[in-house]
Every structure is written in structure tokens, then in C-alpha cells.
Image: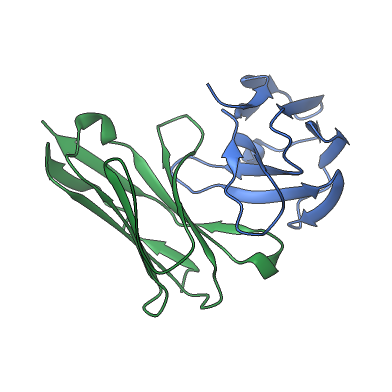
Amino acid sequence: DTEVTQTPKHLVMGMTNKKSLKCEQHMGHRAMYWYKQKAKKPPELMFVYSYEKLSINESVPSRFSPECPNSSLLNLHLHALQPEDSALYLCASSQEQGLGQPQHFGDGTRLSIL
Amino acid sequence: QKEVEQNSGPLSVPEGAIASLNCTYSDRGSQSFFWYRQYSGKSPELIMSIYSNGDKEDGRFTAQLNKASQYVSLLIRDSQPSDSVTYLCAVGRDTNAGKSTFGDGTTLTVKP
């Protein structure tokens, strides 16, 4: 069991659907991250939130929209996704952004776009 | 040249042997180094973090860092079949807003 909880674990959606991925941590971490991981590839950073403010957007298409309602929650809103967006989406958190902090990952949401 | 390079493997060792996983990085200003293991279909799990030159031991795992040569390695003593997973090296630079760059991973197979 991880201390970073992601829901849902699996999601299948059509290209016209709107859905959201959710991530929650109660470790008091102030930095939260979204990663995308394709099979047999390393995680690719998408977004970083620090103290509930967007700190890094790695040129992610606007069909992905992150949101950080409070220090424990991180959402990723999805709209008009493409089949190539099918991947494992990982949420992670660390005590602070930077300062050499290790990141703790959730179990991920496996997303399939039809 | 990739920022973080690992041998993709698979690396095969017999049970009970020492497995040695290597990682090199290109950014000489890197300051934080992490080893994760990732079971197929699961999330990366932090094994070790190391920040200064030398060795750091935790149970059967030893991380070794040599900043002058820009490599970090992970030694697994008394390898077990349950250690057969993919190991990811991640390198970070505090001035880079906390971004960690991951290597492609090395798949280890421990044969009984």
C-alpha cells in the first residue's frame, strides 16, 4: 500500500468524454506531481504543484488540465483525449519541491482511450 | 546523449550473487540521486537516495555515488528471485525546480 492514493485505478474513455483523475496524500507534502508513463518507458513529468500553485508545466497539451484544490489533493482533468494518450498516469508527492526531495508515487491510473 | 543512461538489460544473475546496476548522468550540477524499483504495471517504489560521494547502505542494498565520474550505482547483495524487477535511476538538480530525470531502467532477472 502506498501513502499516495490515486483513483480510479483503471479508466476507459472515449475521445469526446470528460473525466478526472484524482490523487490524495496525507503526508503533509507540499509538492505534488503528475507523470505519464508508457509501457517499458520511464515516467515523463507533466506538471508540478508547489504549495498549491502550478510550478512546472512541461508543455503538456491543453486537453490535460491540472488542479490543486488544497495541499492534499491533486486532480487531472481530461477532455478530448487522443488514443496516444493511453498510458499509466502517476501522481507523486515530496516534502518540498527541489531540495533533493525523493518522490513517493501512487499506484497510478491506467488510462485507455478508445 | 541522454541525460540519464542505464543499461537496459536484461541483467541476469544467479540467486545469492551480487547484482550491480549502473547509471551515468550528463549534468555535472546534479545533486540528488535516487534508485526506484518498479514491478510491471505498478508505480515506482523508492529504494535509496544518495546525495554525497561514497557508499550508502540499507539492508541488502548499497548505493554508490561518484560525482567526478558522474555515475551512480546500486548493488544488491544476496540477490533473490523477488528482486527480478525493473530498476530506475533518477537524477535531480535543486536549481532545476525539483525535476528528477529518470533513466530508461534496467531489468534484473535473478535465476534460482
Q: Which chain is blue?
A: A
Q: Is residue B96 above or below residue B59?
A: below
**Does B31 sit left or right of B20 as displayed?**
right
Where residue B4 appears, as percent x and y from the top left, is 46, 64
Q: In the rendered image, is residue A87 in sight?
A: no
Residue A44 point in image, percent of width and height: 60, 50
- Chain B hue? green
Q: Nearer the viewer, residue A47 or A1?
A: A1
Note whether residue B44 is visible: yes
User: Residue B79 appears in which quarter of the rendering?
Assistant: top left
Horizontal and vertical percent for residue A76?
78, 34
State the image coordinates of residue B34 (x, y, percent, origin top left): 47, 53
Above/below status of B73 relative to A21 = below
Number of numbered labels in the structure image: 0
Q: Residue at x 66, y 59 (%)?
A: A99
Give the quadrant of residue A92.
top right
